[in-house]
Amino acid sequence: MNFVIKKTLVIVQIEITLSLSIIYQAV
């Protein structure tokens, strides 16, 4: 269970990072 939660958090963190990258590139 902990492995799944950690994996989900990593995926969310990657999605946030990509979103921020796109925003910074658009500016």
Image (tube, grey):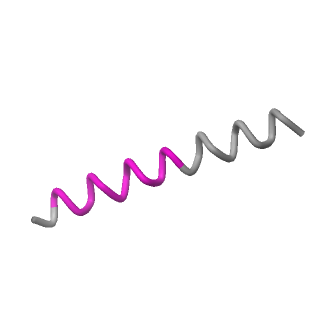
Numbered range of the magenta stretch: 3-15
In the image, is residue 2 above or below residue 7? below
At which x and y percent is residue 21?
Answer: 69, 39
Q: Quadrant of the N terminus?
A: bottom left
Q: Which residue occupies the foreground of this view, 26 or 6?
A: 26
What residue is rendered at 37% in x and 52% in y?
A: 10
What residue is rendered at 68% in x and 47% in y?
A: 20
Residue 24 forms part of the magenta stretch: no
At which x and y percent is residue 13?
Answer: 47, 53
Q: Is residue 13 left or right of residue 26?
A: left
At which x and y percent is residue 9?
Answer: 36, 59
At which x and y percent is residue 16?
Answer: 56, 51
In the image, is residue 24 above or below residue 16? above
Tell me the quarter of the picture where residue 8 sits: bottom left
Quick one: which residue is furthest to the left in this view? 1
Q: Is residue 26 left or right of residue 6?
A: right
In the image, is residue 1 above or below residue 11? below
What residue is rendered at 15% in x and 66% in y?
A: 2
Residue 6 forms part of the magenta stretch: yes
- The mark tally for this picture is 0
Q: Main secondary structure of the magenta part?
A: helix
Q: Quadrant of the C terminus?
A: top right
What residue is rendered at 27% in x and 59% in y?
A: 6
